[in-house]
Image (cartoon, coloured by chain):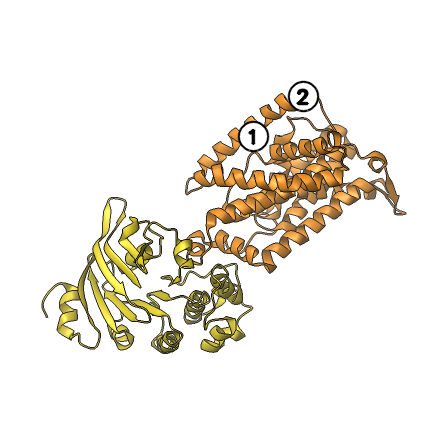
Chain colours: A yellow, B orange
Amino acid sequence: MLETRGLTANYGQFRALFGVDITVAAGECVAIIGANGAGKSTLMRSITGVIGNAPGMVLHRGEPIGALSSAEIMKRGIAMVPEGRRLFPSLTVEENLLVGGQARKVPGPWSLDAVYDLFQILRERRKSPGIALSGGQQQMVAIGRALMSNPELLLCDEISLGLAPVVIRDIYAALPRIREGGAAIVLVEQDIGKALAVADRVYCMMEGRVTLAARAAEVTREDIHSAYFGVAA
Amino acid sequence: MIWLDTLVQGILLGGLYALFAAGLSLVFGIMRLVNLAHGDLIVLAAYLVLMGVTLLGLSPWIATLVAMPMMFALGWLLQAAVLNRVLGKDILPPLLVTFGLSVALQNGLLEAFSADSRRIPVGALEGASLDLGLVTVGIMPLMTFASAIVMIIALNGLFYHTALGRAFRATSDDAVTAGLMGIEPKQIFAIATGIAMVVVTLAALYLGMRANFDPSIGPARLIYAFEAVIIGGLGSLWGTLAGGIIIGVAQTFGAALNPEWQILAGHIAFLAVMLLKSRGLFPRAVD
């Protein structure tokens, strides 16, 4: 459903991605792991059009989308939970959720009520400013906001970063229910154990390149170690 | 009793300044753009209304309703074709472009309508007044003030109770993330400038009905509007009204003391507020 072909990305003179090829099939959960600075977030920003690319470097259902705007890409059903959550400070929790669904109205399992059922604490806090919530609750809003558009593909950039283990557990517990709704998920993670536990396939990145592509169930510690650090275990 | 009368006149005058300022406040709040041509766009809209009245024989109210969609389209085009290209991290290019637009508009209006001062004719309404016992107020200032209130209520309703308003606020907070939500920031900016021009048209109606205007008066209106926005605290429309009232009251009291002090008193009030509260009276929590 989504494919990158030889994807490159630059920040000015600095090249951050060197020909990245990944694929995501419908309904699949794919983990992208790698150390800080490996290019994972840059890959997400390229797929979502925050960084512009050559058209053919990103394909959605076989069509080139690499040069489309973020908004156009989102309307095709690729929703993003950005790194750092990025809630809108002047919007309430409920408004943050509504803004996620207002540009793309398609039938699907997700609505305000469905998101409140998934993350029940948000129902109580719905009139609060989004940024008044705890980090974990903000992450729930950010996920709910992306689900409101009933996406085909949900890109989650570092959803466990900076959160307490018990909060991470709650958030990861929601992922199976999101998959039941039919969305494919891409999880960008530094927490390898968490990511492998829920993913079907895994890519490991290092220094702007994919160093490992494997089925999550088959990958070994040694594979990961060498792909992650670039040395044999 | 003269002082009470002066105070009431000043408050009502504040309504006019709030009308001048609301469009400026809206555009600045959403895209951090200071439109230096704002005053000249008010004057342009006043000529548009005047043409509706004199050439087509419309009433000023109908002429304003006709001019509003035209000004919306002009604002939309201006933003989409010009201003969106210069918006960015550097605040200088949009300032230069709108300054240039201001000069071009003044000269264009001079070319088209000459330097003669004009007025939108309103007949008997012009001198009509209402006796409230303690004070007598003009119908026209009262309508100006009421229009400002209605317009602020309408704009706040748009901001806080519609999907478009959510998109405005989300884009103002974080345009990149708004893009990830399927909102095209440049389209939002174009719509916002269009709406600002609708407000400008309403301001133009009262500008043209209450006093004479000519192609050169835009920049002074911009200054009053700018001061009202700054006094109110950027991004709050009720604050903008409060700012307009402060300038209006200062001007009428200044004029009561000495007619030459009217304009000066308004500017002094602005400076006094800036000395006491440099972020304005009602600053936004996040900025």
Whole-percent x and y of residue B254? 74, 35
Answer with the quarter of the image where residue A87 lies.
bottom left
Q: Which of marks 1 and 2 is nearer the N terminus?
A: 1
Output the chain of dot 1. B
Residue A225 or residue B262, whichever sits in front? A225
Whole-percent x and y of residue A182? 38, 73
Q: Which residue does the numbered mark 1 point to in the structure image?
A: B102
Q: What residue is rendered at 51% in x and 55% in y? A: B286
Whole-percent x and y of residue A43? 28, 57
Left or right position of A119 against B239: left
Quarter the N terminus of chain B occupies: top right
Residue A174 or residue A162, whichever sits in front? A174
Q: Is residue B264 visible?
A: no
Q: Which residue does the numbered mark 2 point to in the structure image?
A: B115
User: In the rendered structure, which amino acid carries the disc numbered 1?
Assistant: Ser
Q: Tag 2: Cα neighbours inside 10 Å, few (<14), some, or many (≥20)?
A: some
Mark on residue A134? none
Relative to B27, residue A188 above or below: below
CA–CA distance in space, label 1 to label 2: 16 Å
